Image: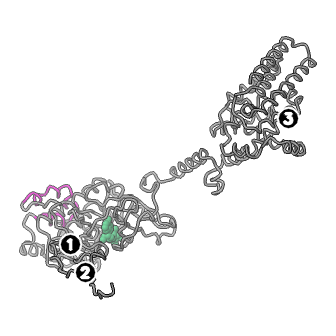
């Protein structure tokens, strides 16, 4: 160590002398070099005696040291012991290595481009420029020897000695090298940012490399770098590729840095292509994230399942949107439904869409909604069978909730266009939820021309039945009237079997309309084409009032919903403040609503046990011997009967 320092001192002195006599010429320079090399030999011998000191030698490019993975460093230690055998082989293959040198040379240039910043390159050029200057040239040479001999810069393994031996073998080559060291003193951090910065710089390429191609120590260093460089070359070749163009293998070969950058770019690209209005579709999960519990129902537009989120155990309704009718692209009906529900769904009386899911083969779309235990139609059917009905307070609650949900939609300029009892869901907590937005549309002012073939027949308004193409919120209000009557009657109000029968049924119950009560009816195609019998005014009064199914105020509200002229029909906001809701009996709070066994849950989850069932069963009396056996088998005595499990045993066998 002290010797080494001393050497350095001597070298410094010599360097100073040399710098003081610039004009002495190459002869003196050669002498100095010879001396230096002599000292280098001594130093090397000393270091070979002392492993610790060996480790301090380095002529590795700084940037390559930074880039080298720990794994490859290890590998390098293993494969490069300082043996004369390897020396010999190296000599033998030197020519071959030189042949390879062009390839390595170009790699190195790429490597340097990637790992240096613009500033580094500037300084590098400056260094090259000043290198021509005599004093600077000396400094460069001095740096070389200083680096070769300087101990303690960084830890190096034993194989570094070999590199130094190579330097010794061709000292002239090193010293004659115009700019060998600048290659190894790049301070730029390696990293993807720098790579891209340099990729586009052609200037450096044209200037030529500062490396001497035949410099053996460079060959050696390049050999050491080879594996790392190959990896970097691979990476570089993918760096300007698109993520989607790479194979799995190529993706795996990327560094985490590059991989995440390409992946992020790809994600951004995909997201930018998504329609702006469908945030729910972005990043949608796969249906495999859910477990199918049971099938609930199948409607016109899709099958509904009860599903369980595997991560959270949350129960949801999964509506599979029908795709097979669509020849090209995404079905417009499904898109509309998703769109309308996402727009209007943020209301307690509208079924909430949780997420949109994609099928395993990317060919199906599912809508995950909050699961609501009942649909009103099934519930009314069950009640009718059991000769039960909703109390007036419960009827008011249901109707008020329905009006709130539809009013919310109408305020958002959305028509439901398919209101009926099977599209109204009722939770165990007594909350009504409007579902099935498959026919929902946005409307505007002025009105757009729509098809008149909307709304399930029994709930279709007279203007639609007579062929109106310009219609608006009153079509939903008519349906609400039909639903109100059905909740009270426990059967549909106008169950027609065809359009003509439907309109006839309405006229028979409410009386045939006149131009006095509905002036615009003459503009409707159906009105002018068809001849209707003159049915007397309003038979419903008898049915509802005489049967005491509704009080007078309630009946008035019903008639406001079932007003012929859409312009005179009550609006949802007016109906919400109707006196029927503030009269006794008042609407029942949702939490006081009775709970009913849900059809959709019946197969899988039996309704909670009745109070009777929950009553404690009498203790089962068993004889001491049976009790002992049951204990051994860990069976409770009361479990013997309810499970059909009976112990018939022969005590002698135990
Ligand atoms: N969120 C939900 N929770 C529980 N059950 C639901 C839910 N949504 C729908 N259902 C059940 O599935 C049935 C059909 O659903 P939906 O009305 O949305 O489908 P559709 O194909 O549009 O039917 P339609 O023939 O009425 O147009 C409903 O009547 C209801 O019984």
Rendered image: mark on residue 640: 2
Q: Earlier in the sequence, mark 3 or mark 2?
A: 3
**SS at mark 1?**
loop
How many residues crowd mark 1 within 10 Å: few (<14), some (14–19), many (20+)? Answer: few
Task: Tell me what residue is drawn at x 46 percent, y 72 percent.
Answer: 325
Q: Earlier in the sequence, mark 2 or mark 1?
A: 1
Q: Quadrant of the N terminus?
A: top right
Residue under label 3, please give it. Answer: 215
Across and down, in percent, residue 315 comes to 33, 64
Report the number of discs: 3
Contact, mark 3 vs mark 2 (Cβ under 8 Å): no
Across and down, in percent, residue 504 comes to 22, 78
Q: Residue 145: name its quadrant.
A: top right
Across and down, in percent, residue 210 comes to 80, 31
**Vertical order, 595 against 628 (above or below):** above
Residue under label 1, please give it. Answer: 609
Side (left or right) of 486 relative to 20: left
Q: Quadrant of the C terminus?
A: bottom left
Q: Alpha-carbon distance for marks 3 and 2?
A: 93 Å
Q: Alpha-carbon distance for marks 2 and 1?
A: 20 Å
Question: Between 515 and 652, which is closer to the camera in this rendering?
Answer: 652
Q: Residue 161: name its quadrant.
A: top right
Across and down, in percent, residue 319 comes to 38, 67
- The colour mode here is one colour
What is the magenta range? 554-583
Visible residue check, residue 525? no
- Magenta stretch holds residue 573: yes
Question: Between 344 and 367, which is closer to the camera in this rendering?
Answer: 367
Q: Alpha-carbon distance for marks 1 and 3?
A: 90 Å
């Amino acid at each position: 160590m002290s010797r080494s320092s001393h050497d350095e001192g001597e070298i410094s002195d010599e360097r100073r002398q040399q710098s003081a006599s610039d004009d002495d010429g190459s002869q003196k320079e050669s002498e100095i070099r010879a001396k230096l090399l002599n000292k280098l030999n001594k130093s090397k011998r000393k270091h070979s005696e002392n492993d610790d000191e060996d480790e301090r030698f380095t002529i590795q490019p700084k940037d390559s040291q930074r880039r080298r993975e720990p794994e490859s460093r290890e590998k390098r230690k293993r494969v490069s012991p300082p043996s004369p055998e390897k020396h010999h082989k190296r000599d033998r293959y030197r020519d071959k290595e030189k042949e390879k040198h062009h390839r390595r040379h170009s790699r190195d240039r790429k490597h340097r481009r990637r790992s240096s910043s613009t500033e580094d390159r500037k300084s590098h050029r400056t260094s090259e420029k000043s290198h021509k200057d005599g004093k600077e040239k000396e400094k460069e040479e001095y740096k070389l020897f200083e680096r070769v001999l300087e101990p303690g810069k960084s830890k190096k393994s034993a194989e570094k000695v070999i590199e130094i031996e190579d330097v010794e073998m061709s000292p002239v080559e090193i010293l004659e090298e115009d700019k060998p060291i600048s290659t190894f003193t790049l301070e730029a951090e390696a990293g993807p940012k720098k790579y891209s910065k340099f990729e586009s710089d052609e200037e450096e390429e044209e200037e030529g490399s500062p490396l001497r191609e035949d410099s053996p120590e460079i060959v050696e260093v390049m050999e050491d770098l080879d594996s790392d460089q190959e990896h970097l070359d691979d990476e570089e070749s993918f760096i300007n590729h698109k993520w989607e163009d790479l194979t799995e293998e190529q993706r795996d070969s990327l560094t985490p840095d590059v991989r995440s950058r390409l992946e992020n770019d790809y994600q951004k690209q995909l997201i930018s292509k998504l329609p702006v209005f469908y945030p729910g579709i972005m990043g949608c999960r796969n249906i495999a994230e859910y477990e199918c519990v049971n099938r609930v129902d199948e409607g016109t537009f899709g099958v509904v399942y009860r599903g369980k989120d595997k991560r959270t155990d949350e129960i949801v309704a999964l509506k599979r949107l029908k795709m097979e009718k669509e020849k090209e692209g995404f079905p417009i009906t499904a898109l509309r439904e998703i769109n309308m529900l996402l727009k209007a769904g943020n209301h307690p009386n509208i079924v909430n869409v949780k997420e949109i899911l994609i099928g395993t083969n990317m060919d199906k779309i599912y809508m995950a909604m909050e699961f609501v235990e009942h649909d009103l139609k099934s519930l009314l059917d069950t009640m009718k069978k059991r000769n039960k009905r909703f109390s007036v307070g419960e009827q008011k609650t249901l109707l008020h909730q329905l009006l709130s949900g539809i009013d919310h939609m109408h305020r958002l300029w959305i028509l439901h266009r398919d209101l009926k009892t099977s599209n109204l869901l009722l939770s165990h907590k007594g909350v009504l939820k409007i579902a099935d937005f498959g026919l929902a549309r946005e409307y505007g002012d002025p009105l757009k021309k729509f098809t008149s073939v909307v709304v399930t027949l029994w709930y279709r308004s007279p203007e639609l039945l007579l062929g109106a193409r310009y219609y608006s919120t009153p079509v939903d209000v008519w349906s609400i009237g039909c639903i109100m009557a059905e909740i009270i009657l426990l059967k549909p109000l106008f169950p027609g079997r065809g359009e003509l029968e439907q309109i006839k049924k309405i006229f028979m119950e409410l009386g045939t309309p006149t131009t006095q009560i509905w002036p615009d009816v003459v503009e409707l195609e159906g009105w002018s084409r068809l001849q209707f019998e003159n049915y007397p005014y309003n038979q419903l009064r008898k049915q509802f009032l005489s049967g005491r199914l509704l009080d007078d105020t309630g009946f008035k509200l019903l008639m406001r919903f079932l007003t012929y002229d859409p312009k005179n029909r009550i609006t949802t906001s007016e109906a919400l403040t109707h006196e029927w809701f503030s009269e006794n009996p008042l609407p029942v709070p949702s939490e006081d609503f009775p709970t009913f066994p849900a059809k959709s849950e019946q197969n899988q989850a039996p309704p909670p046990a009745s109070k009777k069932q929950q009553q404690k069963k009498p203790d089962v009396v068993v004889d001491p011997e049976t009790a002992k056996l049951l204990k051994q088998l860990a069976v409770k005595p009361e479990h013997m009967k309810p499970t059909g499990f009976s112990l018939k045993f022969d005590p002698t066998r135990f």
